[in-house]
Amino acid sequence: MEDFDKYRAEMNEKLLGSGHLGIKRFFALDTQAYEAGALDKKTIELIGIALDASCTHMYAPGVRRHIQRALKAGAKAYVLGPTVLRTSTAGTAAAALLLGRTGRWS
């Protein structure tokens, strides 16, 4: 994980160093999305686990990062399993809904 984090940090620096306005705006939005406010850090990271596990089809580096951050923010380990399980079943339910509505996968 440390190698991935190092690589990600290097690439982020290169992207930000490009001076591209859209990239700067994206990074600003990404930073603000993870700041505590109405939601505490633990909840934000649990949502991050759910999104990386479902929307990105179990993007392992992202899931690991959010798990580490959730634990650091005070989440209990026993909460992590149900978080991933619920995203998996939500994905299955979404697939069933798609199949039921369209009668096909594509």
Image (cartoon, helix red, strand yellow):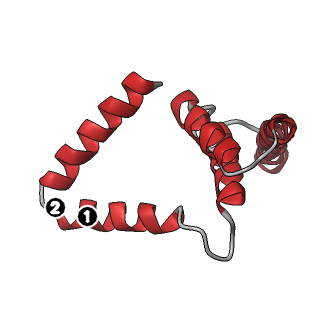
Where residue 17 appears, as percent x and y from the top left, is: 14, 53
Q: Secondary structure at mark 1?
A: helix
> Which labelled disc corresponds to residue 24?
1
Which kind of residue does numbered mark 2 sit on?
His
Where residue 54 appears, as percent x and y from the top left, is: 67, 41
Q: Nearer the viewer, residue 79 or 83?
A: 79
The answer to whether 21 is drawn above or below residue 54 in the figure is below
Which kind of residue does numbered mark 1 sit on?
Lys
Badge 1 crowding class, 10 Å Cα cut-off, few under 14, some 14 to 19, many 20 or more, is some
Question: Mark 2 and 1 residues: CB-CB less than 8 Å, in contact?
Answer: yes
Q: Residue at x 63, y 31 (%)?
A: 58
Q: Residue at x 62, y 37 (%)?
A: 68
Which part of the image, by quadrant, shows the C terminus?
A: top right
Q: Locate residue 47 relative to residue 26 in the image: left or right.
A: right
To which residue does mark 2 refer?
A: 20
The answer to whether 88 is drawn above or below residue 90 in the figure is above
The answer to whether residue 23 is seen in the rendering is: yes
Where residue 82 appears, as percent x and y from the top left, is: 87, 39
Q: Secondary structure at mark 2?
A: loop
Residue 16 quadrant: bottom left
Q: Nearer the viewer, residue 77 or 102?
A: 77
